[in-house]
Image: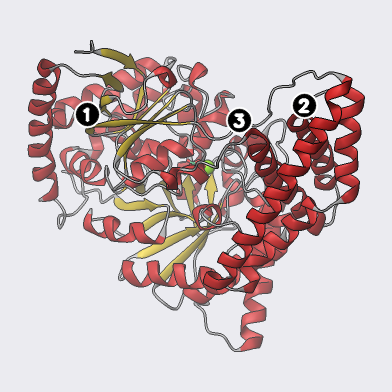
Amino acid sequence: MKSEQRFQGVAVSPGIVRGLAYIYRPDEELPPRRSIKEADADGEIARLHDALGNTRRQIIELHDKVKASLGASDAEIFEAHLMVVEDGVLIEEVQKTIRRDLCNAEHAFQIVAQRYAKSLAALEDPYFRERAADIHDIARRITRNLLGKTTTTLADIKSPHIVLAHNLSPSDTAQIDRNIVLGFCTEVGGKTSHTAIMARSLNIPAIVGLHQILAVENGADILIDGYSGLLIVHPTDATLFQYGELQHSKAKVEQQLNELRETDSTTRDGTHIILSANIEQPGDIAQAAASGAQGVGLFRTEFLYLSGTTLPTEEEQFAAYCQVAAAARPHAVIIRTLDLGGDKLHATLHPVAEENPFLGWRAIRVCLERTDIFKTQLRAILRASTCGSIKLMFPMISGIAELRTAKRILEECRAELREEKIPFDEKMEVGIMIEVPSAAIIADLLAKEVDFFSLGTNDLVQYTIAADRGNEHIAHLYEPTHPAVLRLIKMTVSAAHAADIWVGVCGEMGGDITLTPLLIGLGIDEISCGSAVLPRVKRAVRSLDAAACRRLAADALDCDSGSTILARSEAVARAHYGELF
Ligand code: PEP
Ligand code: MG
């Protein structure tokens, strides 16, 4: 009988699940350097050529498979990979490095490949930048062949498990099949990292910020409590009994929440709050509708880009947006244009790591430079606006010039479609996310140019406090109720209302029922949150008095401490819907 072990982390997605542990270790980036003797250099070079030969065979196999199933254009990427494997200059360089530095082949290959990729990525021409991504991909494959390893991805897990990993990238989570991955735990990450957001959207329990969990044995019997952030390895009978009871009482509350589906999200004193859902994939719309959402307040379109190796075409995007718009009728869908960068890196667009990705080439900044990608998406969104009611929203706007350029490019797309006689909704509303402090501060200027604002509090909090949203070490500083954040929200709401436009919250603050009293008090018109938490938010809205919430917010704006503001909002929340905690 093994003894029970407990690990405490940060709960990011609620639920309780028991299952077998799957320790997920995606490939290490840089293989360790091993010194070799001069006499062994020929042997290392022979190993290199064996690995190149194996890699070549694998690529040809993959190419043929993809060509047969998806067509020649999807298979093209492998032709580019073959060119890397057959690049005489690169191979010569690796051989030289082995002889000169007297190091192992995998290390030499990685060093040379990284140097190549870096210089390609620095070039203006997008074609060469894409080649940099190919070099990274291929370098990983060759390294695995040198090390005699096979590729592992989450898609390789064949039976239901709970995944334990150091980290999961958004492209890892984009591959999760919720019938197979019952829940996950990671060593790094924060509550508003995209991995955590994805877990909530998949409605699977998840915990982040758990230390030393990779020492748990593969296949161990584990239980995760996504309410309190507890991972329990080898739970005892007493623990299992206790969790059985907890699950039972949670199920009862869920049942009562389900009954709210058809009701209105209006406070007791008659203030209507539009309650809409955040979705990450077109397929999420069914769950959004089932949760009783009044449409979609944020469709994060990045996941269309992260789940494949090539960028989605206009037709593919049109199909996805049209499907969502049609399913959401009569309600609206707010489609956010591409927000890649930060912690959502695309192999092609971000082949080389940036020093400060969250302050770097992200979201609208990528789109304004890669207008080819941007226009493809804008055309698809415009065309889909005839399938239902669509609004469009630009992320990460930091100033007026950026917004005007984005609107000009949108206008170009409209003109093209008119010319091509392709119908679209001429009156489609255009809004922006307020998630950069500079945008909140000039909200009065921005409000004149758009139809609505949506506060992206996940980023607004991180940028205001300079606390990385995905870094568990500074999670205590990441405070949504920080007085500075509250003031920025208030400024945004006042500017919006003065210009007669509405303002919503689509960051994770919207789904946190502890903060619902504060948001209503600050004058928020719309809350968009994950479908899984939406019925709870509706119950919260229906239990509260807007007038009392306004008094709470006025006091909060006078208060100097984030933790006191949080405690006051929580006290109001617990007094009105304590059973939800
Ligand atoms: C936000 O920043 O609050 C937001 C909704 O956008 P994302 O989480 O995708 O950055
Ligand atoms: Mg954001």
| 2 or 1: mark nearer the eye | 2
Q: Nearer the viewer, residue 442 or 291?
A: 291
Q: Which residue is mark 3?
A: 28
Q: Quadrant of the C terminus?
A: top left
Disc nearer the start of the sequence (3/1):
3
Q: Position of residue 294 (x, y in %)?
A: 29, 58
Evaluate whether residue 324 shows in this view.
yes
Q: Position of residue 220 (x, y in %)?
A: 29, 24
Secondary structure found at label 2: loop
Q: Which residue is mark 1?
A: 573
Marking on residue 104: 2
For residue 353, side relative to residue 126 (left or right): left
Q: Nearer the viewer, residue 160 or 515?
A: 160
Above-or-below relation of 91 to 460: below
Evaluate whether residue 550 shows in this view.
no
Secondary structure found at label 1: helix
Q: Nearer the viewer, residue 66 or 369?
A: 66
Q: Position of residue 354 (x, y in %)?
A: 72, 35
Report crowding for label 3: few under 14, some 14 to 19, many 20 or more residues within 10 A (C-alpha): few
User: Residue 398 falls in which quadrant of the image?
Assistant: top right
The answer as to whether callout 1 falls within 8 Å of ligand 1 is no
